Amino acid sequence: MNDTSAAIAGAVTFVWLGMVLAISFLEAPLKFRAPGVTIPVGLGIGRLVFRALNAVEIVLAAVVVAAVAAGGAPAGVIAPTAVAAVLLAVQLAVVRPVLNRRSDRVLAGEDLPRSRSHLWYVALEVLKTATLISLGIALSAS
């Protein structure tokens, strides 16, 4: 893989990883522990934050895919790039709509039992995090 493409893809991969770690594993759980933050308020904040995160992730993923494609990457870089992009796509196309429908109902005032739907999103975040670490290491070795 050429040095410029590897450097760009590596830098963007680690920025992407940092954003996922900061938002999904730090901000998201902590906001519900803040004084006065109710479930509806936390959901409203979470929807805004994750909508912004996901929009940035789409851009970062596109940059990584473009850099990897342009750089003549080996299979050890192509595979985790594809996996990270697919995991993001599944989160956005499959899991987020389910979570959005539920949060719409809660924000409309419905009293719903606890849901485990968010655990699918978290599981995909864990897999995406591991994949981004793997991709970053593979790009550093390129």
Image (cartoon, helix red, strand yellow):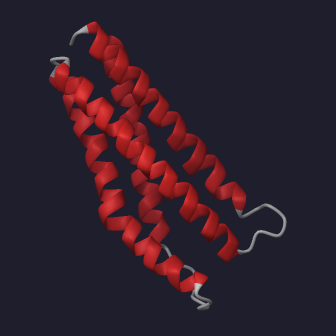
Q: Quadrant of the N terminus?
A: top left
Task: Give coordinates of residue 140: x percent, y percent.
Answer: 37, 14
Left or right: residue 116 compared with residue 71: right
Q: Which residue lies at the image location 30% right of the left edge and 63% below the top edge?
A: 93
Left or right: residue 39 compared with residue 64: right
Q: Residue furthest right?
A: 35
Task: Give coordinates of residue 91: x percent, y percent.
Answer: 36, 58
Q: Which residue lies at the image location 34% right of the left edge and 28% below the top edge?
A: 135
| 117, 102: nearer the viewer | 102
Task: Give coordinates of residue 14: x percent, y percent.
Answer: 46, 28
Find residue 32 and report its image quarter: bottom right
Task: Give coordinates of residue 134: x percent, y percent.
Answer: 36, 29
Q: Residue furthest top?
A: 3
Find residue 113 and report its image quarter: bottom right
Q: How many marks?
A: 0
Q: Quadrant of the C terminus?
A: top left
Left or right: residue 48 compared with residue 133: right
Q: Which residue lies at the image location 33% right of the left edge and 38% below the top edge?
A: 61
Q: Is residue 142 visible?
A: no
Q: Is residue 21 visible?
A: yes
Asked if 43 appears above or below 8 in the picture, the reply is below
Q: Which residue lies at the image location 45% right of the left edge and 72% below the top edge?
A: 99
Left or right: residue 75 compared with residue 109: left
